[in-house]
Amino acid sequence: MDSSLYKSVATGRQLKYNYYYSVPALGKPVLLFLHGFPNTSNDWRHQVTFFKERGFGLVVPDMLGYGGTDELHGVQAQGSVVVGRLANYYPDRFLGFGFLAVGYNAPSDAKFEQFIAFVRHRTFQLSLMIQHFKFPTFSPLAL
């Protein structure tokens, strides 16, 4: 990807975002490509070449904590989560969405306590499975 088309912007919270931007030809839409963990915008280089040659505009950011974008205290934005939220909050601003490798994850209306109980239950199951494999005589089925 042409490094001269990379730009950066600082937010009000003084976070620097690095992104690739290519202007669309007349009548062509702008495509947004978001990478996932643990990649960078460079992962889209083949798609950028393909669509840029056909006149599409492109916005390809480095997500939080990757490439030239600042890290936010250990927070790393994953592309599928961001795309999902864009689909939820701004569907009228997009023609469509594509999820590659990780599917759409709808926001949940479950209460936080239910979520914590679910995580604890799954962690307990995993702990039992690990103990079973460490100590073959131990059987979680006996509980």
Image: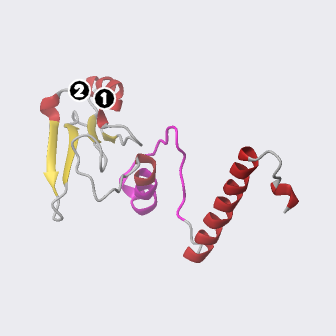
Residue flagged by tag 2: what amino acid is it?
Met
Quadrant that contains the C terminus: bottom right
Q: Residue at x 40, y 53 (%)?
A: 82
Q: Is residue 68 above or below residue 1?
A: below
Label 2: state its secondary structure: loop
Q: Residue at x 76, y 47 (%)?
A: 135
Give yes or no for residue 53 being in the magenta stretch: no
Q: Where on the picture, by quarter, is residue 59?
A: top left
At label 1, counting other C-alpha atoms closer than 10 Å, the crowd grade (few under 14, some 14-19, many 20 or more) is: many
70 sits left or right of 97 in the view: left
| Residue most extreme to the left | 4
Q: CA distance from mark 2 to mark 1?
A: 7 Å
Spot occupied by residue 98 in the image (x, y as percentages of width and height): 47, 41
Label 1: state its secondary structure: helix
Q: Are marks 2 and 1 in contact (CB under 8 Å)?
A: yes
Quadrant that contains the N terminus: top left
43 sits left or right of 3 in the view: right
Spot occupied by residue 19 in the image (x, y as percentages of width and height): 22, 42
Residue flagged by tag 1: what amino acid is it?
Val
At label 2, counting other C-alpha atoms closer than 10 Å, the crowd grade (few under 14, some 14-19, many 20 or more) is: some
Q: Where on the picture, by quarter, is residue 123?
A: bottom right
Q: Earlier in the sequence, mark 2 or mark 1?
A: 2
Q: Which residue is mark 2?
A: 1
Q: Nearer the viewer, residue 1 or 53?
A: 1
Q: Is residue 103 above or below residue 123?
A: above
Main secondary structure of the magenta stretch: loop
Give yes or no for residue 89 being in the magenta stretch: yes
Circle on res. 48: 1
Q: Which residues are magenta?
A: 83-107
